[in-house]
Image (cartoon, rainbow, N blue to C red):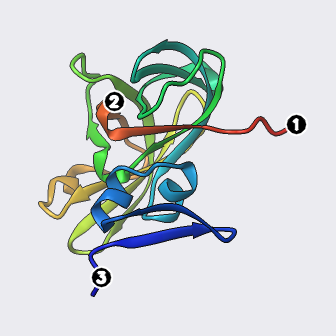
């Protein structure tokens, strides 16, 4: 077994690191997408303050995002959030950076955890939340309206080329 992994894209190294580094600290959008599941948005940077950005995604929804590198205002970016970083609540919360009102589309039980598939109400964007196998999901039903939320520290953001 290896303690380091190399991710290649079209014959060049994207990132070399431990599996944990590749999963939790990807350096590129390719690595973030390649290693594990992720919720993904495309948007434009509206505010930039060092590592913290405000990214406007489709439907005018603003996300507070963390980035490893400086990103200029008005840059087009891709934002990634792992499903296990997404929490769910029935009531709107005031103590979280990112929050989207959603409808439960499906609940997929696999024993160790449960994946809840959601549709964001303002944009129709689909996202996933992975809940631990504690049974907390037992009160969630298809069609329920919930608030998906996560901390900005659990986001990753990468500049992308504008596709015309």
On the image, numbered disc 3 is attached to which residue?
Answer: 2
Quadrant where the C terminus is found in the figure: top right
Q: Position of residue 125 (x, y in %)?
A: 58, 40
Badge 2 crowding class, 10 Å Cα cut-off, few under 14, some 14 to 19, many 20 or more, is some
The residue that appears at 53% across and 49% down in the rendered structure is: 28
Q: Assign a secondary structure to mark 1.
A: loop
Q: Could you tell me which residue is drawn at 14 percent across and 60 percent down?
A: 135
**Which residue is at the front of the view, 51 or 106?**
51
Quarter of the image for residue 21 reads: bottom left
Quadrant for the N terminus in the image: bottom left
Query: Would you identify the image quadrant in which residue 96 lies?
Result: top left
Q: Is residue 121 above or below residue 92?
A: below
- Earlier residue among tags 3 and 2: 3
Q: Nearer the viewer, mark 3 or mark 2?
A: 3
Please tell me whether mark 3 sits on a helix, a strand or a loop: loop
Please report contact status of discs 1 and 3: CB closer than 8 Å, yes or no.
no
Dot 3: within a 10 Å radius of its alpha carbon, few (fewer than 14), some, or many (20 or more) residues? Answer: few
Q: Is residue 55 left or right of residue 65?
A: right
Q: Which mark is residue 164?
A: 1
Residue 152's disc number:
2
Name the foreground residue: 48 vs 11.
11
Q: Residue 97 location, x and y as percent? A: 32, 22
């Amino acid at each position: 077994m290896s303690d380091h992994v190399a991710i290649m894209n079209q014959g060049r190294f994207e990132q070399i690191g431990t599996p944990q580094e590749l999963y939790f600290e990807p350096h590129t959008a390719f690595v973030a997408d390649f290693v594990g599941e992720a919720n993904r948005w495309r948007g434009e940077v509206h505010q930039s303050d060092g590592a913290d950005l405000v990214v406007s995604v489709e439907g005018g929804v603003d996300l507070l995002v963390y980035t490893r590198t400086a990103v200029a205002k008005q840059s087009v970016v891709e934002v990634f959030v792992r499903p296990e970083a997404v929490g769910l609540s029935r009531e709107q919360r005031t103590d979280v950076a990112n929050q989207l009102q959603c409808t439960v589309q499906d609940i997929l039980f696999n024993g160790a955890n449960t994946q809840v598939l959601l549709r964001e109400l303002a944009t129709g964007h689909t996202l996933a939340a992975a809940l631990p196998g504690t049974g907390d999901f037992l009160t969630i039903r298809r069609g329920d309206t919930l608030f998906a939320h996560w901390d900005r520290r659990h986001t990753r953001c990468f500049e992308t080329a504008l596709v015309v």
